[in-house]
Amino acid sequence: MILVLTNADTEILALRTVAEGLPPGFPAVRAANPARLTEAPSLEGVDAVLVRLLGGRRAWEGPFDELVRRCLAGPIPLLAFGGEAAPDQELAAATTVPDDIAARGFEYLVQGGLANIEHLLRFVADTVLGHGYGFEPPVAVPSCGVLGDPDIDPARPTIGVVFYRAHLLSGNTGFVTDLCAAIEARGANALPVYCYSLRPDGDDGTVPAIELLAAHDVAAVVTTVLAAGSARDDGDGWDASALAAMDVPVLQAVAATSSSDAWADSSGGLSPLDVAMAVAVPELDGRVVGPAFSFKETVDDGDDLGAPVTAYRTVADRVDRIAGLATRLASLRRTPVSQRRVGLVLSAYPTKRSRLGNAVGLDTPASVIELLRALAAAGYRVDRVPPDGDALMAELADAVPYASDEPEPVARGDGAGSWSEDEYERHFAQLPAQARADLTEAWGPAPGGVFTDGGHLVFAGLDLGGVLVAVQPPRGFGESAVAVYHSPDLAPTHHYVAFYRWLDAEWGADAIVHVGKHGTLEWLPGKSVGLSAACWPDAALGDLPVVYPFVMNDPGEGTQAKRRAHAVIVDHLVPPLTRADTYDDLARLEALLDTHAQAAALDPGKLPAIRRQVWDLLVQAEIHRDLGMSEPPGGDDGFEDPAFDDAILHVDGYLCELKDAQIRGGLHTLGRPPDGEAELDLVLALTRLDQGAVPSLRTTVAGELGVDLASGRRADVDSVEAECRRRLSALQARRWEPSSAEGDATLRWVGQRLVPALHRTTDEISSVLAALDGRHVPSGPSGAPSRGMAHALPTGRNFYSLDPRAVPSPLAWQVGSLLAERLLEAHVAEEGRYPQSVGLVVWGTAAMRTSGDDIAEALALMGVRPVWAEETGRVTGLEVVPLDELGRPRIDVTVRVSGFFRDAFPHVLGLLDEAVRTVAALDEPASENFVAAHGAGDPRVFGPKPGAYGSGILALLESRDWRSDEDLAAVYLAWGGYSYGRGGAGVDAPDAMRRRFAGIEVAAKNQDNREHDIFDSDDYLQDHGGMVATIRALTGRQPKAWFGDTADPTRPRVRPLSEEAARVVRTRVVNPKWIDAMRRHGYKGAFEMAATVDYLFGYDATAGVAADWMYERVTEAYVGDVEVRKFFEQSNPWALRSIAERLLEANERGLWNASRQALDTLRAGLLEAEGWEEGR
């Protein structure tokens, strides 16, 4: 018997065909796929073994080594080959036949095809086993070519369909012909091209398949082949230049390794292996991610061959979706610009007139104006461009028929367009039966009762001719008060689905541009990746092309848009960064501290009076609370005591930290590079830390000045900052000429690499235009540039993330281990003991930015560490850290993961579960192993319901339909009470979550960069705040809430959440520097201020982070300031009303004991805002 072991199912398919035609008496041929074997197979009756391992020995390492031992013991001849065109030396070393026989056998496999497979078997039978059946030498088969003889009509666009040569050689081409037929039915030519690889072939860097496609002038490419690029030699990203040179959209059509039944039943859609290999890796090339359309089905049970035989079979509606998207992408370049129609869609969640155009870090209105001007200049029909962002938003606000901040939100017919209910019902009837049923159950029969007017569904926006500026409809939770408590997977409204279908079918959009992070489309219920027709993003969007400008430091949520809404990402620069500096009381305190230092040196007799002034100012500014000082050191009479000066050192260090904090110095406008002071501030921010091999400018200067930055002394830090600024300012004055920075590696890098990359911010607009032209948007890395990721610049690229199997990375392990140490040190310092149980919030985006700091922290707390494969850097397992090395107890950890983390890192969920089980099984004292003490019965990893996302807290707060912690906890548990791990993925486990959360003593959340803060986003208050509120509701006690700061990964810090809240309020929220920056951004600046108040309120409602003084200061700065009120009146009067109402709500709910003056100010501001609105 000849045993063939191959993890290429195409070869098993070929073997079935070949085995049927072998001569009588030929040795039996049996086959198996090592991917389906957990141990080496029996060799009873086996005369020779052929092994083909795609991925080499490591693809089947343990069983393969055992197989080799058995073959040697037999002895049984063994021929072992890899999956590449070049021999695998490790497998060749295991081969036991002569080298010339092995080389010839390998040649048969490399050439492939039925004839070569047959004669390989004959060759082995004759040369190895001594038979005489006869064999032919290997026959060369082209590595690349065209399948069949397609009819190419030059009047139609041609779409290349690229697939692996192995499918051709095994006869497994039905999925290719199905796709080609669907493309042709859509009015395009299909050019099916087979190839061995899309990577360069030989030293000349050419790729035969790409040259073949270019020769046929394809307008788009659909491919099932894996990545075409490779890592750059300099380590700064991915090189897919050969593919990019075609300058056409490349659509990744997923040929899944699962069956269609398994896919249909899965909430995740694709297997972790398919996500990694068929989605994440191709994303590196800058491909558009399409759905799975082809699946491995068993076509023969394998009784004769010994292994089931699989082949690809397609699902008709998924084939049609791929074909539709491909033809629409291809038709963009063939449609004259003047005839193209483009929808610019602004997100709005919550849908308030004060908060239209939600986009993190982006001045959305100004960016839309830039886009409109660019589109008009490119030849698009743009009938008019509003003069500025404020004018645009004033028109849009008047056109929004469904704003929740109207007294009675109703539809009205003065929006951008409307659709008759009859026409919508015809489109509704085309949805899959399950989608129709879900929609009807949630919202009643089509067209529903939400936002209809006189028999029409009404949509918000401005029709400017060939360009529509539209507002994304409400998601639906605000329209269903009950759903937020019970239905995290609530279907979108009829109105929501109708908007996208109307935009496509009625208004006639050729493509849409979703402006900024992020909308709600990509977060609608459905499979995680590899969507079906019944998944809501697919059902709503159809095959309409999507271009998505997205902030560069959020790879996770951008990846979600790529994978669930086939979006072409165009990343944009982070908002300007600046130093917080001091102001008002902080500036006065700084002056007093300087006076104190001078007096200590020159006139000590004045010190008692100065100390009293310092204390009085600390109390006035409420800073004494930040520092935990309830009274002066030494009591009321302690001002004579020199010991007071020790406290002053502490005050000085805290003031230094506040002054030196990085905050946003404004908002980014798409395509507009920073200039002047904003450019200088950003370059300063990006040189604070090392950038790869480029040293930190701060560290360099501190070394030259003999200053220890770690001391935190304000004078030292200020001197270093001033010198860094002086040097960069001088370089800027010389137009950043690198040669003028001779002798300073960092300054040379600034001039040669950093500033030129910033100046290419203009690529953001040109890349949007390129995508709308049906051209390729080049790929690039993502990340937070202020955290050592400046190599992710320039922007304007279709960013990618990381290999999910490399999480946590060795560097992340270092950072996460330090985080665990700092957290425990902080807790022990306060409580005098270790916490037994820690709750940790983990997000997918942060995991992508940091390669897994949070996961590393969780593992470190439990006292286990990852094991990595040396060759790939991927995590292969865990090892226990011995107690004597750990030096402390093992901490029990409960993790609440985001929906995106669940989707992107399913293997990490298993890793966490494995860690819990491993530690719980250790034979250690309960006092040293809290995991074992609590038992492994309950899961430790919880997250959203499969197919759903979020925590539900924001929707509840916006509805105002809550009264107590119990209400907040009910929603948090309903949305997040699903366990993940070996016990199952997404098991409904609210009781287990209650038990676990009731035992949590510490609730922790980390932040890895300072390009945003905890009051910039609703995610912190929802996930971390929701955790705190749930623990409080279950136990009646407030858990310790800690905030981890790894903005500088070499110096992780952990502080109380309340301290972080005070820090953010002082450095940004009420800082005139930030407020003035927001005023420069008009409507969106006012939006940001209103959003900040909402997030402050929300985090306080959930986690109790805000002291009364914070509300008082916000009231004074936002509502009491006459100039700021004038700004609201001119740019966004709805924002002032939103702010006043929210602050009054805080007082009404008992979150804030407001002063009479503050209440009077708020009520007057509210009346004034309402008057402005009535006058519009």
Image: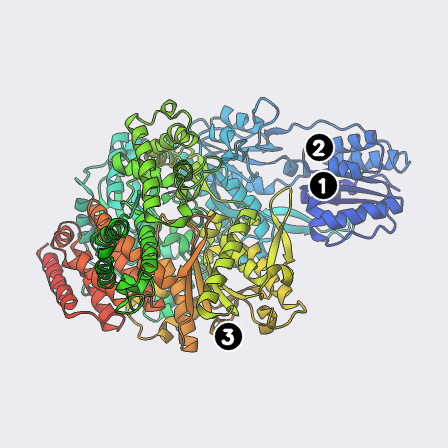
What quarter of the picture does the C terminus occupy?
bottom left
Q: Which residue is mark 1?
A: 14
Residue 799 lies, in percent from the top left, at 44, 41
Whether 411 is drawn above or below 758: the answer is below
Q: Please, what is the three-letter code of the amino acid marked with disc 3?
A: Arg
Q: How is the image coloured?
A: rainbow
How many neighbours does mark 1 have within 10 angstroms: few (below 14), some (14-19), or many (20 or more)?
Answer: many
Front-lying residue, 969 or 481: 969
Q: Secondary structure at mark 2?
A: helix
Q: Is residue 471 left or right of residue 165?
A: left
Q: Which residue is mark 3?
A: 995
> In which quadrant of the rendered view does residue 841 lie?
bottom left
Q: Is residue 504 left or right of residue 557?
A: left
Mark 1 against mark 2, which lies toward the viewer?
A: 2
How many neighbours does mark 3 have within 10 angstroms: few (below 14), some (14-19), or many (20 or more)?
Answer: few
Residue 793 lies, in percent from the top left, at 40, 36
Name the residue rendered at 87%, 33% in the picture: 127
Sequence order check: which comes first, mark 3 or mark 1?
1
Front-lying residue, 429 or 918: 918
Residue 105 lies, in percent from the top left, at 78, 33
Q: Secondary structure at mark 1?
A: helix
Q: Please, what is the three-letter code of the amino acid marked with disc 2?
A: Val
Q: Is residue 687 left or right of residue 164?
A: left
Residue 797 visible:
no
Whether 885 is drawn above or below 81: the answer is below
How far is the residue under mark 1 from the one under mark 2? 14 Å
Sequence order check: which comes first, mark 3 or mark 2?
2
Mark 3 against mark 1, which lies toward the viewer?
A: 3
What quarter of the picture does the N terminus occupy?
top right
Q: Which residue is mark 2?
A: 110
Q: Are marks 3 and 1 in contact (CB under 8 Å)?
A: no
